[in-house]
């Protein structure tokens, strides 16, 4: 099912029942080498200093499959990551699903109805799994990544961003995991920073997550 996001901005929220629409950042900075700081005053999903990510291999295969079925002229794909978080702060990504989105010069948009429906269906089968972050394909994080991260930050204070570089050029396929935080000077917010975290592919993981 093809989904098209509205191009016009809607300051009053009208017409956004099926799309989470975000304006382009005007004065934001993206940096992957800054120290981690608190993102919001929400309850933390995990402790930032101890964050590590473990991903099941079939999650990466599903992302590759999603990219292979992308819309024509679509530069990248995004989706929701589901899994668990232990007391030590390790995020285990067990599964995920694609989420329709659009990116233009004026805005990016996410189909929130699709996201909510897929999450509800998935949690009927795997009730212990929760949203732990999101994925995208590409070489690096950019301004749009910040906006998508803000969307997932509505459900999780510090979501994990899994970035899969398929190595379509001369480089080999690689995968990195990030968390983000606000870069502030006193009370002034200067931008958003991304920092990569330890990522492990669990080669012993089962093809399907356990129900619970």
Image (cartoon, rainbow, N blue to C red):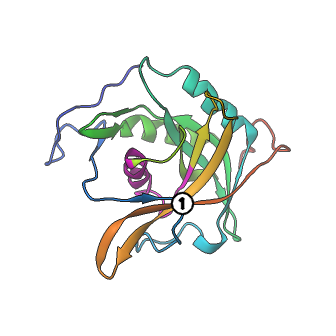
Tell me the residue at 55%/66% (across/down): 45
Task: Tell me where residue 180 appears, x and y as whole percent.
Answer: 49, 62
Q: Front-most of 46 and 190?
A: 190
| Residue 116 included in the magenta stretch of the image | no
Task: Tell me where residue 210 appears, x and y as whole percent.
Answer: 75, 44
- Please identify the quadrant where the N terminus is shown: top left
Q: Which residues, given as a range, are shown in magenta?
A: 143-161
Q: Secondary structure at mark 1?
A: strand
> Which quadrant of the view contains residue 165?
top right
Against 187, residue 40 (above or below) is above
> Which quadrant of the view contains residue 117?
top left
Q: Which residue is mark 1?
A: 179
Task: Tell me where residue 69 appears, x and y as whole percent.
Answer: 54, 19
Indicate left or right for 28 with 60 as reference: left
Callout 1 environment at 10 Å: few (<14), some (14 to 19), or many (20+)?
A: many
Against 191, residue 22 (above or below) is above
Tell me the residue at 53%/72% (across/down): 35
Indicate left or right for 126 with 12 as reference: right
Q: Residue furthest bottom?
A: 186
Q: Residue furthest left?
A: 12
Q: Residue furthest front?
A: 170
Against 69, residue 183 (above or below) is below
Q: Residue furthest top?
A: 72
The number of callouts visible is: 1
The answer to whether residue 48 is visible is: yes
């Amino acid at each position: 099912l093809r989904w098209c996001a509205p191009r016009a901005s809607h300051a009053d929220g009208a017409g956004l029942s099926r799309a989470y629409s975000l304006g382009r950042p005007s004065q934001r900075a993206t940096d992957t080498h800054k120290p981690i700081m608190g993102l919001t005053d929400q309850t933390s999903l995990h402790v930032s200093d101890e964050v590590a990510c473990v991903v099941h291999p079939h999650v990466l295969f599903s992302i590759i499959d999603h990219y292979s079925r992308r819309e024509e002229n679509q530069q990248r794909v995004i989706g929701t990551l589901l899994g668990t978080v232990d007391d030590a702060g390790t995020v285990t990504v067990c599964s995920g699903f694609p989420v329709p989105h659009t990116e233009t010069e004026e805005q990016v948009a996410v189909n929130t109805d699709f996201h909510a429906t897929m999450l509800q269906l998935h949690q009927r089968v795997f009730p212990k799994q929760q949203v732990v972050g999101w994925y995208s394909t590409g070489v690096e994080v950019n301004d749009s990544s910040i906006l998508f991260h803000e969307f997932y930050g509505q459900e999780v204070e510090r979501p994990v961003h899994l970035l899969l570089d398929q190595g379509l050029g001369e480089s080999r396929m690689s995968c990195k995991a990030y968390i983000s935080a606000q870069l502030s000077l006193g009370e002034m917010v200067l931008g958003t920073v991304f920092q990569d975290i330890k990522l492990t592919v669990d080669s012993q993981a089962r093809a399907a997550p356990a129900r619970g």
